[in-house]
Amino acid sequence: MNSKSPFEAGQTYRMTHQRQVILDEIRKVKTHPTADEVYEMVRKRLPRISLGTVYRNLEILSARGLIQRIGPASQQMRFDGDTKDHYHLRCVSCGRVEDAPMISVGDLEGAVRNRSDYSIMGHRLEFVGICPACKRDRGLHGDKL
Ligand SMILES: [Zn+2]
Ligand SMILES: [Zn+2]
């Protein structure tokens, strides 16, 4: 628990203007944008910013816990300005990610902590399915797949 991220080691932290704009844009939306989408959003305010700068700042912001990375490594990483514990819904068809409309279910971390030697720092829970828009497109009806 006392490991420092490489970004903090020996480097005084300062929120650059670019980084603040990136953080503002991510916090503004509930869409859990990918890095490419963040770049498109930020470019409207900072037309000269590069994609590499956006990637680098996303790494720094998530290393500092100011945003949350979500999604398995096999898919494009998405970012969330909401760092409170909450759950996600992911559409397997279009890839959209939304906050699941529920509060946390009991003490999941405590249950795992009791059964393992890990120091648990948090957890991620994701529900996968087909979003309403994709269901409409496919002509699927009903709640079950
Ligand atoms: Zn969808
Ligand atoms: Zn979220």
Image (cartoon, rainbow, N blue to C red):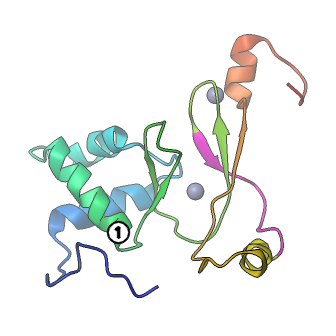
Res 104 → quadrant: bottom right
Locate residue 145 relative to residue 138 in the image: left or right.
right
Q: Please state the horizontal and vertical placement of residue 142, each as a whole percent of the image.
A: 91, 25
Q: Is the magenta stretch mostly helix, strand or loop?
A: loop
Residue situated in front as seen by the camera: 121 or 136: 121
Q: Please state the horizontal and vertical placement of residue 75, each as a whole percent of the image.
A: 48, 36
The residue carrying pointer 1 sits among few (fewer than 14), some (14 to 19) or many (20 or more) residues within 10 Å by Cα, namely some
Locate residue 112 relative to residue 56 in the image: left or right.
right
* Residue on which the image places disc 1: 63
Asked if the magenta segment contains residue 99, the reply would be: yes
Q: What stretch is highlighted in magenta?
A: 97-106
Tell which quarter ligand 1 is in: top right
Res 65 → quadrant: bottom left
Q: Report the residue that reaches farthest toward the bottom.
A: 2
- Residue 46 visible in this rendered orientation of the protein: no
Query: Does residue 34 sit above or below 125 in this rendering?
Result: above
Query: Does residue 118 sit above or below 75 in this rendering?
Result: below
Quarter of the image that includes the C terminus: top right
Q: Please state the horizontal and vertical placement of residue 55, each as a whole percent of the image.
A: 25, 50
Beta carbon of the mark 1 residue lies under 8 A of ligand 2: no
Res 115 → quadrant: bottom right
Q: Please state the horizontal and vertical placement of residue 92, each as a whole percent of the image.
A: 64, 29
* Residue located at (34% from left, 63% from top): 24
Q: Report the residue that reaches farthest toward the left.
A: 48
Locate residue 21 relative to residue 136 in the image: left or right.
left
Q: Report the residue that reaches farthest toward the front.
A: 117
Asked if the magenta segment contains residue 124, the reply would be: no
* Residue located at (49% from left, 49% from top): 32
| Element class at badge 1 | helix
At label 1, the amino acid type is Ala
